[in-house]
Amino acid sequence: MASRRNRTINMPAPYLRQVWLDPARIADRAAYPFCLPFLRGEFELSLDRPITIIAGENGAGKSTLLEGIAVLAGYDEAGGGKGHWPVDHSDAIEATGGDLSKALRASWLPKVTNGWFFRAESFFSVARYLDSAGSPSADFLSHSHGEGFMRFFRERCQRQGIFIFDEPEAALSPARQMEFLKLMRRMEDSTICQVVMATHSPVLMAYPGARLLWLSKYGLDPVTVDQTDHYKVMREFCADPTGFVEAVVEEWAPRRRETDQF
Amino acid sequence: MASRRNRTIEMPAPYLRRVWLDPSRIADRAAYPFCLPFLRDDFELSFDRSITIIVGENGTGKSTFLEGITVLAGYDEAGGGKGYVPVDHSDAIEKMGGRLATALRAGWLPKIANGWFFRAESFFSVARYQDKVNTEIIPGVPMGIPPDYLSHSHGEGFLRFFEDRCRKQGIFIFDEPESALSPARQIEFLKLMRRMEQSTICQVVIATHSPVLMAYPGARLLRLSKSGLEPVTVEQTDHYKIMREFCADPAGFVEGVMAE
C-alpha cells in the first residue's frame, strides 16, 4: 500500500515502554542531574499509553528527564530529530540530559529512532536551521512566533516515531493550544506516534486518554488535571482575577540589596 | 546619595509617552509589516501608565510592534539591552521590527536609552551571550563570574535573568514572558512587576497571552486587533473567557474542542 511506503514497523505506539535508572551506572551521585530529588530512590517510568504527559513545578527536573529520553531515542538534546543537529551545537546546550541518559535504561517494543524532540527554547534555532537548510516549506520565522510553531508541529508530526515536547504551549495562545489538542488527537489516531510531553498548561494536561503524571521529589505519580497545582491556581484566578492578583502581589515583602537603586 | 549614583534622570516613568505612525515614511504599503491591518494611517498609542500590557491573538502583529518600539529605544531587535547585540546577529532575527521603526515616531519625556528587550524566543541566545561576555556590573553578581542562566531549568533561568536586569532606570519590553513560567512562577513575575512599578523609574511594556499577567492591577491593558488598540479589562479578553470555561469543566471543554 502506498501509504505504508515509509512505515517500517507494523505495531502501534507506545514503542518506548519503560525507562529506569540503573544506579550502577552513576559515576557521581552528588553531581547534577543525579542529585535531583526524584532520581534518589528507584526511579522508573512506565509508558503504557501513546500519549504521556508530565507535569510538575519548574526545577523538578522535567526538562532534564525529557532530554535523557531524547538521547536514549538517538536525538540531539537541543531539539530536532535524528540527524538534525542544530546550529552551533558545540556552544549550545546543557549536557545534563546526555549525562542522565548514560545511567538510564530503556525497553522498547520495538526500538524506534524516528521522531522529533521539541523544546520551546530550541525551537528558534531548529527553525532557523530548517530555513537555512532550504526545506521547501520552511520559512517558519516569517510569521509570528505562535504561527511558526503550529506549522512546525504539523509538518513534523505525521510519520511513525516518538515525539517529545517540552512545554509546547510556550508560544501558543489559548486558541492555539486548542489546535494543538487537535494535533495530539490526530497523532494518537494515527496509532504510529508516541508522544511524551512536559507542560504547565492545564488545557494540554486535560487531553483525554493520556497518562498524566506529576513529577515531584518523590518521583512520578499518576494525577488528574483537577489535582494539579496548575489547575487549582488557574481555577482560583478565574473565580476572581483582580482579587487573586491583588492578594498575591500584596504577599510581596521587599528584598533589597545594597546595590539596588530602589 | 549613594543609591542614586547611576540614576541620571529624576523623573518618574513612563518615559516613552506616545508612538505613532508617519505614513509619509512608508515606502511600500503592501509589504510586511505595513500590510498589518492595525497599522492604519492614523495609528497611535499613548502610554499613560508605567506598565502597559498588550493582548491579542497570534498573528495580529504584537511581536512586530514590540520590536518596533525596541528599535526606537535603541536596542537590538533580537533581545538584550543597548550595546548588546546578540550572538550571530547576521543570521538571527526578523528584520520586521526594524523596518516598522523607520516609519514610527515617538514622543519621550525624556528620552531614555537604558533598559532591556526580552523575547521568549531570544532569551536562550541572549543568556548565552551574557554568560560569555559578562563585562557589565550586575548587582549581586561578582565581576568575572558568569551568571550561568542555562544551568537550571528554563523557568528558573528566566526569573534570575529578569531579576538581574530589571533594577535600573529604563524601559523594559517583554514579549510573552510567561512562556517558560508555571502558574506559580507567573505569580513571582507579578511581584517583580509590582517592584518595578514602585521603583517609579521603570517603564514596562508587555505582550502576553497569560490572563494572570493581564490582571496586574494598575496597568493599562490594551487589545490589539485589526482595527487597532483598544482598552479592555481582563474579563473581556478571549484568553480569560477560554480559561474560565475550561476551569468550569476541563474534561467537557477539551472533548468539546476536539469534537469540532
Image (cartoon, coloured by chain):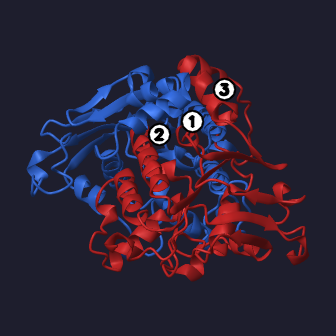
Chain colours: A red, B blue
Q: Chain of mark 3?
A: A
Q: Quadrant of the C terminus of chain B?
A: top left
Which kind of residue does numbered mark 2 sit on?
Val
In the rendering, at what x and y percent does residue A184 appear? 47, 51
Mark 1 belongs to which amino acid? Met
At x 43%, y 25%, the residue is B241
On the rendered image, what quadrant is the N terminus of chain B found in? Answer: top right
**In the orientation shown, which residue stands out farthest toward the front?**
A1
Q: Which residue is mark 2?
A: B204
What residue sits right under mark 3 in the picture? Answer: A248
Circles 2 and 3, Cβ within 8 Å, touching? The answer is no
Image coordinates for residue A62, horizontal then vertical, percent: 69, 55
Give the answer, above or below, for where B210 lies relative to A168: above
Q: Is residue A50 visible?
A: yes
Secondary structure of the residue carrying numbered label 1: helix
Q: CA distance from mark 3 to mark 1?
A: 12 Å
